[in-house]
Amino acid sequence: MINCRVAKIEDVKELCRLLNQLFTQEAEFLPDEMSQEIALKKIISDESIGEIFVAQKDDKIVAMVNILYTVSTVLGAKVAILEDMIVDKQYRGQDIGSSLIDFSLKSIKEKGCVRVTLLADDNNFKAHKFYEKHGFVKSNMIPFRKLS
C-alpha cells in the first residue's frame, strides 16, 4: 500500500538519496548533496516557499515531488512549479508516481494554485507521456537560464 504525505525534516537524507538518482539521469544537473540538503530544509521549513510530497511503501520513502509556489501576474493567483519528481528505480512501474502526482495536484489545488508548470528533459519521452497522462500539456514557452 502506498501512503502519500508532506515531507518532514527527518526525511531529508532519504530525499537526497532520491535526488541523487534524479540528477544522475538528467542532462543539465549533477548531484550535490550539501546543496540539496540546504534547499530541502529551506522548503520543508517554510510552506510559503513550497512543499515536498513523498510516497511511502512499507515505511520507506520511494518517491518524491518538489513543488515551489509563486504568484502569476497573468492569472492574478497562486501558481506552482513542479521542480523535481522521482520514483526510486526499484519501485517504478507500480503506479507510485501516479499516486504521488495525484495526491500532490489535489493538495496544491486545495491551497489555491491555479496552474502548475514543470520542465522535463527534451528527450525524456517516458516523463512526457507520464505528465500528459496526468493532464499536463506542452507549452510554446521555452526555458532560458543564466547562472549568476
Image (cartoon, rainbow, N blue to C red):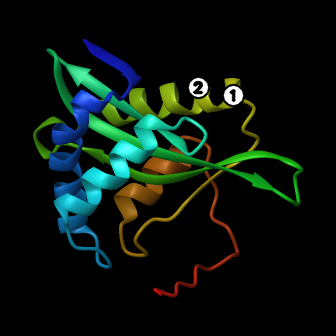
Residues at circles 1 and 2 in contact by the CB criterion of under 8 Å? yes
What residue type is disc 1 on?
Answer: Lys
Alpha carbon of mark 1 to alpha carbon of mark 2: how far? 7 Å
Is 4 on the left-hand or right-hand side of 119? left
* Residue depicted at x 46% and y 59%: 128
Q: Position of residue 70 (x, y in %)?
A: 68, 52
Q: Is residue 137 above or below residue 87?
A: below
Amino acid carrying mark 2 in the image? Ser
Q: Badge 2: few (under 14), some or many (20 or more) residues near its Cα, within 10 Å?
A: some
Q: Is residue 28 left or right of residue 91?
A: right
The percent position of residue 32, horizontal first and vertical second, equals 20, 66
Which residue lies at the image location 27% right of the left edge and 36% below the top edge? Answer: 63
| Residue 107: mark in rendering | 2
Q: Is residue 79 above or below residue 36?
A: above
Residue assigned mark 1: 111
Q: Which label is found at residue 132?
A: none
Instruction: Give the percent coordinates (x, y) of residue 58.
Output: 14, 15
Residue found at the very far top of the displayed protein: 1
Q: Secondary structure at mark 1?
A: loop
Residue 47 in sight in this render: yes
* Secondary structure found at label 2: helix
- In terms of image quadrants, where is residue 15? top left
In this orientation, which residue lies closer to the viewer: 61 or 96? 61
Q: Position of residue 148 (x, y in %)?
A: 47, 87
- Residue drawn at x 35%, y 36% is 97
- At 71% from the left edge and 47% from the top edge, which residue is drawn? 79
For residue 140, above or below residue 85? below
Looking at the image, which is closer to me, 130 or 38?
38
Can residue 92 be seen in this snapshot? no
**Closer to the camera, 90 or 145?**
145
Q: Residues within 10 Å of mark 1 (few under 14, many from 20)?
A: few
The quadrant in which the N terminus is found is: top left
